[in-house]
Image (tube, rainbow, N blue to C red):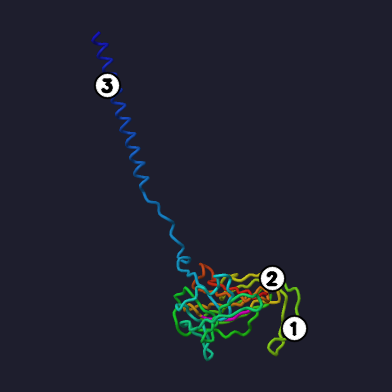
């Protein structure tokens, strides 16, 4: 009888010890999970190229329609910069302008007009561009038709602008007392390369309505030693559209990137 009681008590002690051991293990696992859940998750590091890109704005010295309280020039302030020409040279400086009110007989809208005191190419906002004279390239031709190339030197590099597209028709037209070629083009593409580096496709338009792409400016606007570009890219004869491309905003392996664009409609 004593032997039976001792055996029964021994079993109770063993079972009790196992329960405590299991409870301790469970608490340990639970504690580990709590510690892991307290660890902070780290966001992926931003692309250094994307991080340094500025969200620029550009405006042209011209008339802008009011759409209720909305107007393309609402963001214009005295902190904006001006890319302008003076005595054959180009400069980035503080924008110097006045604003006047007007009225569009065509659309019936009230308007505001930017009157620049300089010979301005574009006004630039939200920018940390350095002010001063800009190194530029004299443009030999302002239109690059499909199958044509435009080569120029900047620093120690030779650059090539090359165009592709389908020519639907060609004709001679008279502009500013001279005759020049005009082509009706679709699926237009414009590439940039430097020496033997891969080409960068930077401008692409499906079609044009009595318009075409026009090269307005080549120069080092952001002062990084590489060329930047301004193109007129009207898609329709009742539109004025200008695009600014900067080399300092280009992604790795690319030469330039679109930094800002303004498109103004003046249809009736």
Farthest-out residue, top? 1
Instruction: Residue at 32% x, 33% y: name it.
Output: 25
Asked which secondary structure carries label 3, the reply is helix
Q: Going by the picture, which residue comes out furthest to the left?
A: 2
Depicted 38 relative to depicted 243: above or below? above
Foreground label between 3 and 1 = 1
Magenta stretch: dominant secondary structure? strand
For label 2, the SS is strand
Which mark is on residue 200? Answer: none
Q: Is residue 189 left or right of residue 157?
A: right
Q: Are marks 3 and 1 in contact (CB under 8 Å)?
A: no
Which numbered dot is residue 13?
3
Q: Residue at x 48, y 82 (%)?
A: 95
Residue 218, magenta (yes or no): yes
Q: Position of residue 105 (x, y in %)?
A: 65, 79
Q: Nearer the viewer, residue 45 or 253?
A: 45
Q: How far across and how far down the image is residue 210, in percent? A: 71, 76
Which residue matches tag 2?
207
Mark 3 and mark 2 lie on one chain; the one further toward the N terminus is 3
Provide the residue span drawn in magenta: 214-219
Residue 264, image x and y in percent?
Answer: 61, 74
Q: Is residue 68 magenta?
A: no
Give the foreground label among 3 and 2.
2
Mark 1 surroundings within 10 Å by alpha-carbon count, few (fewer than 14), some (14 through 19), many (20 or more) = few
Label 1, on which residue? 172
Mark 2, residues whose alpha carbon is within 10 Å: few (<14), some, or many (≥20)? some
Q: Nearer the viewer, residue 164 or 211?
A: 211
Q: Secondary structure at mark 1?
A: strand
Mark 3 vs mark 2, CA separation in Å: 90 Å
Nearer the observer, 207 or 194: 207
């Amino acid at each position: 009888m004593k032997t039976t009681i001792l055996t029964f008590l021994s079993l109770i002690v063993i079972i009790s010890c196992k329960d405590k051991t299991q409870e301790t293990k469970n608490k340990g696992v639970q504690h580990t999970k709590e510690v892991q859940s307290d660890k902070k998750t780290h966001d992926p590091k931003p692309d250094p190229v994307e991080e340094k890109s500025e969200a620029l704005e550009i405006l042209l010295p011209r008339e802008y329609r009011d759409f209720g309280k909305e107007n393309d020039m609402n963001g214009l302030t005295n902190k904006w910069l001006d890319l302008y020409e003076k005595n054959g040279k180009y400069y980035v400086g503080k924008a110097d302008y006045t604003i006047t009110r007007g009225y569009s007989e065509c659309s019936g809208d009230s308007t505001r007009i930017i009157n620049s005191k300089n010979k301005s190419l574009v006004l630039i906002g939200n920018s940390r561009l350095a002010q001063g004279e800009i190194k530029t390239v004299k443009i030999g031709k302002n239109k690059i038709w499909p199958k044509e190339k435009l080569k120029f030197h900047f620093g120690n590099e030779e650059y090539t602008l090359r165009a592709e597209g389908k020519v639907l028709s060609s004709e001679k037209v008279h502009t500013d007392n001279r005759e020049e070629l005009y082509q009706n083009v679709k699926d237009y593409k414009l590439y940039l390369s430097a020496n033997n580096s891969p080409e960068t496709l930077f401008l692409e338009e499906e079609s044009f309505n009595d318009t075409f792409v026009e090269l307005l400016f080549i120069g080092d606007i952001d002062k990084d030693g590489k060329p930047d570009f301004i193109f007129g890219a009207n898609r329709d004869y009742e539109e004025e559209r200008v695009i600014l491309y900067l080399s300092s905003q280009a992604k790795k392996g690319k030469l330039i990137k679109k930094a800002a664009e303004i498109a103004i409609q003046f249809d009736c």
